[in-house]
Amino acid sequence: MTTWGESHGEALGVVIDGCPAGLPLSDGDIQIELDRRRPGQSALTSQRKEPDKIAILSGVFEGKTLGTPISLMVENADVISKSYEDIKDTYRPGHADFTYDEKYGVRDYRGGGRASARETVGRVAAGAIAKKILALEGVRTTGFVRQVGDIVAEEVDYDQIEKNPVRCPDAKKACEMARLIEKVRSEGDSIGGVVEVVTSGLPTGLGDPVFHKLDADLAASLMSIGGIRGFEVGMGFEVARRRGSEANDVMYMDDDGRLRFRTNNAGGLLGGISNGEDLVVRIAVKPTSSISKTQETVDRQGSPKELQVKGRHDPCLCPRAVPIAEAMVNLVLVDHLLISRLSRIDSLGSG
């Protein structure tokens, strides 16, 4: 896929190639995912009012995919570029302003341009299509906020995720997280956290060693989201404190004659290949860089400046990062699922 567009441009979108023909696809299939990502969903998110209404421009005819490139578009509706006029030559701490100038010599300063999280509209739209294909195989991906600041979800009840604005699966901890987010925002600050994504029903054998291991591709995909500063799978960095006898997942044969694992410290992967258990990955999300607290910085000429960022920004990126992370996981999985059909001659059928 290729995403296109800037935060305050006319529109944003994505072009998807390689989607098989004959997949039933409607605006509603995509819109439901975009509605989860859009701003203004609650008091804990940016108050930019964007309907994010999807338009399918190509690749679909009479409700089914054609096997040709699919182009999707969302128009920008609630753009207030004047908020950025005063700081167009000032580098915002934590943003890509300086590096974009260094690389390209020119940048769209309005809302961060291409570096804005608004770019993820195309990712989520494309992920909705991947989700439909994976559903045909019984594969389901669910993301949630595992941690905000020092507050960590202890219970995981999937039914709770969409019932609170934090998208936390632990109702008690969700309330604590919400209070913390409100507190840091009242102080003109922001807070980071951890998003976890779990995929169930994944078949064994997905992953293409050695340079396209499933976890390697997932890391590249998820780390390409703006604001992500860490990736782990399964037990993750905790393995650094463990012994092999603690980290290894013991195998057994279940009553259906299927090889299973008594624990899932590996997060559903061995040697970069899916082992049939739930795929479990996590990403560390940094605090939103745009804060109203006064910060020291410099302008394009290197002159010192004091900066207060104006505009409408999320005090915590985690709740809206959930559908984005789900989309990126699903896009990697659908690629590997389609590739896996070519890995064995007996999977190609008789003929």
Image: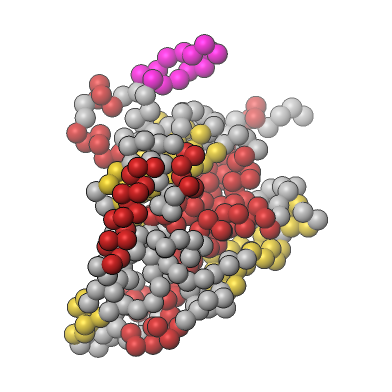
Colour style of the rendered protein structure: secondary structure
Rendered location of residue 342, percent (x, y): 61, 37
Residue 261 makes an appearance in the image: yes
Q: Along the line of sight, which residue is nearer the eye, 140 or 1?
A: 140
Instruction: Report the label total.
Output: 0
Rendered location of residue 24, percent (x, y): 73, 48
Q: Is residue 202 left or right of residue 263?
A: right
Rendered location of residue 228, percent (x, y): 35, 56
Q: Is residue 234 magenta?
A: no
Q: Residue at x 20, y 87 (%)?
A: 303
The part of the chain drawn in magenta is: 250-262
Q: Is residue 259 above or below residue 52?
A: above
Q: Is residue 284 left or right of residue 137?
A: left
Residue 132 position by quadrant: top right
Q: Along the line of sight, which residue is nearer the eye, 95 or 33?
A: 33
Q: Is residue 257 magenta?
A: yes
Residue 194 makes an appearance in the image: no
Q: Residue at x 62, y 58 (%)?
A: 31
Q: Is residue 55 above or below residue 164?
A: below
Q: Residue at x 47, y 71 (%)?
A: 48
Q: Along the line of sight, which residue is nearer the eye, 42 or 208?
A: 42
